[in-house]
């Protein structure tokens, strides 16, 4: 025989708890609705419960307690429960929900029912990984706090004893005896807890824990060179800065002073500039397929935008961007956000899925090669054989070792360098030495990440400024020679009363 009931409560959770208590977890929900601000559920169960008679006294006891707690129990004395219910005035739905056993929070929730079922089946409810981590952290914090309190108490006692002993010795005129060797103290509870297995943290907790870890200094290369004191910066890393030999510093200072006076390079600076600058720089104008290679996809995307603007300013048709490699989807999206301002298209090329590079059309193709140097070198050789050309983008923040690793696969390729300079990381002497080692020449440069008016062809002035940054302190510290003073005086006479500043 089936049994159906109607439950009303302030919310659905209380109503479902009462259904579970009255009919059990096998009850069927026939309907649910909201009436007069209350949640109403109609439920049923097939057959009578064996414990139905046992539930009735418990329900009657709860009704008696609820009626005794109501304001009408005092005025009505000890009248029977049935008479009290008949004499009670009509209450509002909210009062009924508050005073009725349905509106009360029942301990027989689904969570408690599940826990009882697990205990009956002999299944132990283990803690989740998050709960275990929180429990471990709480236990370690409590142990550390207790150990710290005990250590502070012992330390205070020792300090008080030392002060009293020193005071007594001062009065008696006795010199204090030297301290004996400190014994190895046993590990405290907090130290044992540190040696225990730490739970894996993530999110904000991991970020806060990382802040406390000290940053390890970069090792000084074992290459026989002398290194200056470490410079702290660029993300908190200690950067070992190589020191140029004194004869090289003196030669650079003398050559740069001569260049400032006459405008002509001599000696070491002339040798570096002549080896670093090409006779003819790679020009993207007129090239139907122009590739951009390098290890930094963001810098490659910025260079591609500058090349496209140069082509548009020269009157060429609108070019199209092609990003090679499936792993470059995010970089293609970054390039698309920039290219949208110019009305240019960006397409992703992935030969693994059959998305091939089309034949060049009316507009030029600006192809961004993958970061992998071996794969990029293969595409570059193919494009050069078909009449294309390109540049290798090298950020100025790279060290000599990192640049050497990136340039090794390009050793036999006649590709020129685009130096992406940065105001916070000027081009260093080891980086230029690496370019000379691989016989690479710098064709174009940029300063920062601006897109407009940030494509400059490298010349002797730019390269001399790079070298000037290496010996700036020495040039400012060295006194002006008599020849330089005479030259400045003669120049002042030629240009009137305004004297030229001595470099």
Image (cartoon, rainbow, N blue to C red):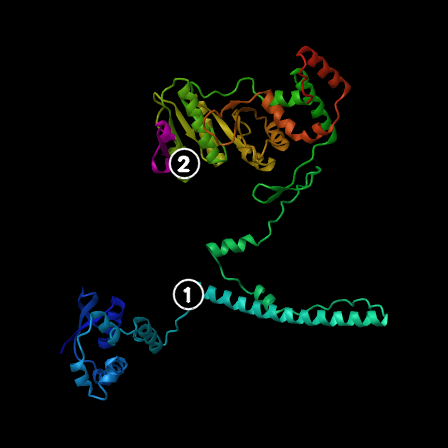
* Residue of label 1: 128
* Boundaries of the magenta span: 339-357
Judging depth in this view, the residue of 132 and 475 nearest the camera is 475
Give the class, few, some or many, for how many residues have Cα within 10 Å of label 1's Cα (few <14, many ≥20): few
The N terminus sits in image quarter: bottom left
Locate residue 128, reporting x and y percent.
Answer: 41, 65
- Compute the Cα span from label 2 to label 1: 40 Å
The C terminus sits in image quarter: top right
Locate residue 402, reporting x and y percent.
Answer: 57, 37
Locate residue 181, reporting x and y percent.
Answer: 77, 67
Q: Secondary structure at mark 2?
A: helix
Q: Residue at x 73, y 69 (%)?
A: 183
In the displayed structure, would residue 53 be above or below residue 92?
below
Asked where in the image residue 481 lies, by quadrant, the reply is: top right
Q: Secondary structure at mark 1?
A: loop
Q: Earlier in the sequence, mark 2 or mark 1?
A: 1
* Residue of label 2: 334
Judging depth in this view, the residue of 182 and 367 nearest the camera is 182
Give the class, few, some or many, for how many residues have Cα within 10 Å of label 2's Cα (few <14, many ≥20): some
């Amino acid at each position: 025989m089936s049994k159906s009931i109607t439950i009303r409560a302030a919310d659905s959770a209380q109503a479902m708890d009462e259904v579970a208590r009255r009919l059990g977890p096998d009850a069927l929900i026939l309907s649910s609705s909201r009436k007069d601000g209350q949640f109403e559920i109609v439920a049923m169960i097939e057959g009578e419960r064996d414990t139905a008679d046992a539930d009735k006294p418990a329900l009657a006891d709860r009704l008696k307690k609820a009626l005794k707690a109501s304001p009408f129990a005092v005025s009505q004395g000890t009248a029977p429960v049935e008479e009290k219910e008949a004499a009670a005035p009509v209450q509002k739905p909210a009062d009924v929900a508050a005073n009725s056993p349905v509106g009360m929070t029942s301990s027989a929730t689904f969570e408690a029912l599940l826990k009882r079922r697990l205990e009956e089946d002999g299944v132990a409810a283990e803690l989740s990984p998050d709960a275990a981590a929180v429990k471990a952290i709480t236990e370690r914090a409590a142990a550390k706090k207790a150990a710290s309190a005990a250590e502070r108490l012992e330390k205070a006692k020792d300090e008080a004893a030392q002060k009293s002993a020193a005071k007594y010795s001062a009065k008696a005129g006795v010199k204090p005896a030297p301290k004996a060797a400190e014994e190895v103290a046993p590990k405290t509870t907090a130290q044992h807890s540190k040696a225990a297995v730490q739970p894996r943290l993530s999110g904000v907790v991991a970020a806060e824990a990382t802040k406390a870890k000290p940053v390890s200094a970069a090792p000084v290369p074992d290459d026989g060179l002398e290194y200056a004191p470490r410079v702290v910066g660029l993300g908190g890393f200690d950067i070992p800065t190589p020191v140029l030999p004194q004869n090289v510093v003196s030669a650079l200072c003398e050559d740069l002073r001569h260049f400032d006076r006459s405008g002509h390079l001599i000696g070491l600076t002339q040798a570096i500039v002549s080896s670093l600058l090409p006779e003819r720089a790679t020009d993207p104008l007129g090239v139907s397929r122009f590739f951009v290679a390098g290890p930094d996809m963001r810098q490659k995307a910025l260079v591609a935008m500058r090349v496209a603007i140069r082509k548009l300013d020269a009157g060429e048709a609108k070019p199209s961007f092609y990003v090679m490699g499936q792993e470059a989807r995010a970089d293609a999206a970054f390039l698309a956000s920039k290219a949208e301002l110019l009305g240019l298209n960006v397409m992703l090329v992935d030969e693994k899925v059959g998305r091939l590079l089309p034949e060049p059309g009316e507009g030029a193709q600006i192809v961004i090669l993958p970061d992998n140097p071996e794969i990029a070198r293969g595409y570059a050789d193919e494009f050069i054989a078909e009449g294309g050309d390109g540049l290798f983008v090298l950020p100025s923040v790279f060290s000599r070792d990192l640049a050497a690793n990136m340039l090794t696969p390009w050793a036999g390729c006649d590709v020129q360098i685009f130096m992406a300079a940065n105001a916070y990381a000027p081009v260093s002497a080891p980086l230029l030495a690496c370019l000379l080692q691989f016989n690479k020449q710098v064709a174009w440069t940029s300063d920062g990440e601006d897109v407009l008016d940030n494509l400059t062809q490298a010349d002797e002035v730019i390269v001399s400024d790079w070298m000037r940054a290496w010996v700036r302190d020495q040039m400012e510290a060295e006194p002006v020679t008599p020849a330089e003073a005479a030259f400045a005086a003669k120049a002042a006479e030629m240009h009137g009363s305004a004297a030229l500043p001595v470099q």
